[in-house]
């Protein structure tokens, strides 16, 4: 008898729990409470995230944290993100989320449409592979080894051969994007998707800094299209002069 009651109760609580969870997600998906975003707008990862937030037209409050603002080593911040890096977000009463890729996937899953992040897992994987590829091969090959070593390193300290080697690596990967974009309007196909966030957010700095670039007509044309997107202009085309080390 006791066992039976426990099973019935468990069934009841399980379904009440599911209903509450669904309700919570329904409220979140309406973005009734502005997202909270910790991170300075000059951070490339924050830029990718903010561009995503802009494309999804979400309400948000952003707090300047990191670099000249500090604040990433406080107990309160480290309790949210033990890595002490930006960005971090909180959505309504949810737990903090860090790692830009995870945050962008979370937002895409909660608020993105079928083009941006399809419900079907096979279609979604086609977008995800390009997003992951862009993060690992383009963003990580550019931001630290090229942008960081040129713009954020004093001229006297710059290691030219290392920068040239990094540029060669980057351009080998850029050639894959060039081929892809010469056949497709966007990185993952015909429609703008989450993959464009992970690839496109690098391009403002890539085309702006003083480097020798190979001819990349398809990527250049794609970049010109991104420059027509208000959220890209607002969140990605941000001056990086305050990061420059003379
Ligand atoms: N893998 C992490 C990297 C985060 C990261 O390194 N963020 C940089 C800014 S792009 C940071 O916090 N730098 C220290 C600072 O801004 O003070 C992610 O993708 O979110």
Image (tube, grey):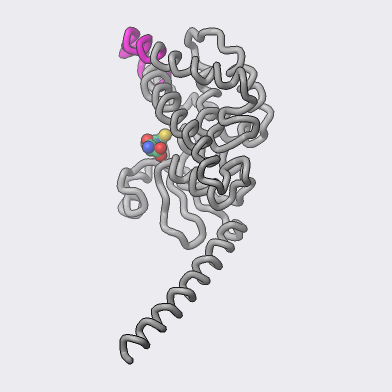
Task: Give the residues in magenta.
Answer: 151-167
In the rendered structure, the answer to whether residue 13 lies left or right of residue 201 reads left
Quarter of the image where the N terminus is located:
bottom left
Q: Is the residue 90 above or below the residue 216 in the image? A: below
Residue shown at 51% from the left, 45% from the top: 121
State whether residue 66 appears in this view.
no
In the rendered structure, the answer to whether residue 240 lies left or right of residue 237 reads left
Q: Is the residue 85 above or below the residue 198 in the image? A: below
Which quadrant of the figure has residue 95? bottom left
Residue shown at 52% from the left, 47% from the top: 62
* Residue 163 on the magenta segment: yes
Residue shown at 59% from the left, 50% from the top: 111
Residue 114 screen position, x and y as percent? 62, 45
Which quadrant of the figure has residue 233? top right
Quarter of the image where the C terminus is located:
top left
Which residue occupies the foreground of this view, 91 or 122? 122
Which residue occupies the foreground of this view, 196 or 146? 196
State whether residue 53 appears in this view.
yes
* Residue 240 on the magenta segment: no
Q: Is the residue 9 above or below the residue 38 in the image? A: below
Name the main secondary structure of what is drawn in magenta. helix
In the rendered structure, the answer to whether residue 109 lies left or right of residue 226 reads left
Which residue occupies the foreground of this view, 105 or 60? 105
């Amino acid at each position: 008898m006791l066992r039976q009651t426990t099973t019935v109760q468990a069934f009841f609580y399980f379904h009440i729990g599911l209903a509450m969870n669904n309700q919570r997600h329904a409220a979140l998906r309406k973005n009734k409470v502005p997202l909270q975003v910790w991170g300075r707008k000059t951070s490339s990862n924050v830029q990718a995230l903010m561009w995503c937030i802009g494309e999804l037209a979400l309400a948000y409050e952003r707090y300047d944290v990191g670099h000249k603002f500090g604040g990433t080593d406080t107990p309160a911040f480290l309790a949210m993100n033990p890595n002490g890096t930006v960005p971090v977000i909180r959505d309504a009463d949810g737990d903090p989320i860090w790692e830009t890729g995870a945050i962008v996937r979370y937002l895409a899953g909660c608020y993105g449409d079928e083009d941006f992040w399809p419900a079907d897992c096979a279609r979604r994987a086609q977008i995800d592979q390009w997003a992951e590829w862009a993060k690992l091969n383009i963003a990580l090959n550019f931001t630290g080894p090229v942008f960081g070593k040129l713009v954020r390193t004093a001229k006297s300290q710059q290691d030219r051969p290392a920068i040239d080697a990094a540029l060669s690596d980057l351009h080998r990967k850029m050639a894959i994007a060039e081929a892809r974009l010469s056949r497709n309007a966007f990185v993952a196909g015909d429609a703008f998707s989450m993959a464009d966030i992970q690839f496109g957010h690098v391009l403002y700095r890539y085309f702006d800094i003083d480097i020798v670039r190979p001819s990349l007509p398809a990527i250049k044309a794609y970049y010109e299209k991104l420059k027509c997107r208000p959220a890209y202009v607002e969140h990605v085309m941000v001056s990086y002069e305050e990061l420059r080390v003379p």
